[in-house]
Image (spheres, grey):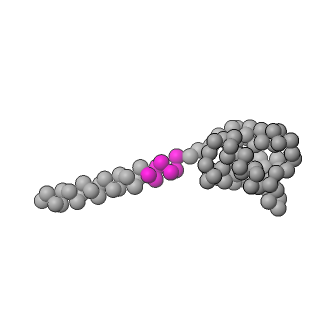
Amino acid sequence: MNALLYIVIGVVLCLALVYLNYRHNHRFTFDEGRLRTAIERIFRETGLRQLSKKDFIYKLKQILNCTQKEALYLYGMARGRGIIVDEDKEVRLAS
Protein backbone atom coordinates (compact mmCIF):
# COMPACT_ATOMS: atom_id res chain seq x y z
CA MET A 1 0.00 0.00 0.00
CA ASN A 2 2.82 2.42 0.84
CA ALA A 3 4.55 1.82 -2.51
CA LEU A 4 1.33 2.57 -4.38
CA LEU A 5 0.86 5.78 -2.39
CA TYR A 6 4.39 6.92 -3.22
CA ILE A 7 3.86 6.22 -6.92
CA VAL A 8 0.59 8.18 -6.98
CA ILE A 9 2.20 11.12 -5.16
CA GLY A 10 5.15 11.04 -7.59
CA VAL A 11 2.86 11.02 -10.64
CA VAL A 12 0.79 13.92 -9.26
CA LEU A 13 3.96 15.94 -8.54
CA CYS A 14 5.29 15.27 -12.05
CA LEU A 15 2.02 16.37 -13.63
CA ALA A 16 1.99 19.51 -11.49
CA LEU A 17 5.55 20.37 -12.58
CA VAL A 18 4.71 19.80 -16.25
CA TYR A 19 1.64 22.05 -15.97
CA LEU A 20 3.54 24.81 -14.15
CA ASN A 21 6.32 24.69 -16.74
CA TYR A 22 3.75 24.94 -19.54
CA ARG A 23 2.05 27.94 -17.92
CA HIS A 24 5.38 29.64 -17.30
CA ASN A 25 6.42 29.30 -20.94
CA HIS A 26 3.08 30.55 -22.30
CA ARG A 27 2.59 33.61 -20.11
CA PHE A 28 4.05 36.09 -22.60
CA THR A 29 1.64 38.77 -23.75
CA PHE A 30 2.14 42.07 -25.51
CA ASP A 31 0.57 45.49 -25.64
CA GLU A 32 0.10 46.75 -29.20
CA GLY A 33 0.54 50.39 -28.18
CA ARG A 34 3.82 49.64 -26.44
CA LEU A 35 5.01 47.62 -29.44
CA ARG A 36 4.10 50.42 -31.86
CA THR A 37 5.93 52.97 -29.68
CA ALA A 38 9.03 50.76 -29.51
CA ILE A 39 9.08 50.29 -33.29
CA GLU A 40 8.70 54.01 -33.92
CA ARG A 41 11.51 54.63 -31.44
CA ILE A 42 13.78 52.20 -33.31
CA PHE A 43 13.38 54.08 -36.58
CA ARG A 44 13.58 57.49 -34.91
CA GLU A 45 16.83 56.67 -33.08
CA THR A 46 18.52 55.13 -36.11
CA GLY A 47 17.38 57.88 -38.46
CA LEU A 48 16.91 55.33 -41.23
CA ARG A 49 13.78 54.51 -43.19
CA GLN A 50 14.76 50.83 -43.58
CA LEU A 51 16.70 48.39 -41.44
CA SER A 52 17.82 44.86 -42.06
CA LYS A 53 15.64 42.26 -40.36
CA LYS A 54 18.54 41.14 -38.17
CA ASP A 55 19.29 44.69 -36.94
CA PHE A 56 15.61 45.42 -36.39
CA ILE A 57 15.08 42.34 -34.23
CA TYR A 58 18.27 43.10 -32.27
CA LYS A 59 17.12 46.65 -31.53
CA LEU A 60 13.60 45.48 -30.68
CA LYS A 61 15.14 43.02 -28.24
CA GLN A 62 17.20 45.78 -26.63
CA ILE A 63 14.38 48.30 -26.32
CA LEU A 64 11.78 45.89 -24.95
CA ASN A 65 14.32 43.94 -22.88
CA CYS A 66 13.09 40.57 -24.08
CA THR A 67 14.56 37.33 -25.35
CA GLN A 68 15.33 36.51 -28.98
CA LYS A 69 12.30 34.25 -29.16
CA GLU A 70 9.98 36.94 -27.79
CA ALA A 71 11.46 39.53 -30.18
CA LEU A 72 10.77 37.23 -33.14
CA TYR A 73 7.21 36.74 -31.89
CA LEU A 74 6.73 40.51 -31.61
CA TYR A 75 8.23 40.97 -35.07
CA GLY A 76 5.64 38.57 -36.46
CA MET A 77 2.82 40.29 -34.58
CA ALA A 78 3.94 43.68 -35.90
CA ARG A 79 3.96 42.33 -39.45
CA GLY A 80 0.55 40.76 -38.98
CA ARG A 81 -0.95 43.95 -37.54
CA GLY A 82 0.46 46.05 -40.37
CA ILE A 83 2.81 48.13 -38.23
CA ILE A 84 5.85 47.19 -40.31
CA VAL A 85 6.45 45.92 -43.83
CA ASP A 86 9.05 43.25 -44.57
CA GLU A 87 10.41 43.29 -48.12
CA ASP A 88 13.46 41.26 -49.11
CA LYS A 89 14.79 41.03 -45.51
CA GLU A 90 14.46 44.79 -45.10
CA VAL A 91 12.04 46.21 -42.54
CA ARG A 92 10.32 49.60 -42.77
CA LEU A 93 7.38 51.30 -41.10
CA ALA A 94 4.06 50.83 -42.83
CA SER A 95 2.66 54.01 -44.34
Q: Outermost residue toward the left?
A: 1
The image position of residue 63, as x and y in percent, is 69, 40
- At 77% from the left edge and 38% from the top edge, which residue is drawn? 41
Residue 37 counted in the magenta span: no
Q: Main secondary structure of the magenta part?
A: helix
Q: Is residue 48 left or right of residue 13?
A: right
- At 82% from the left edge and 59% from the top edge, which residue is drawn? 87
User: Of 48 and 34, which appears nearest the observer?
Assistant: 48
From the image, which quarter does the N terminus lie in?
bottom left
User: Of 54 and 71, which appears nearest the observer?
Assistant: 54
Residue 23 counted in the magenta span: yes
The image position of residue 8, as x and y in percent, is 23, 57
- At 67% from the left edge and 46% from the top edge, which residue is drawn? 61
The image position of residue 45, as x and y in percent, is 81, 39
The image position of residue 5, as x and y in percent, is 18, 56
Magenta segment: 21-27
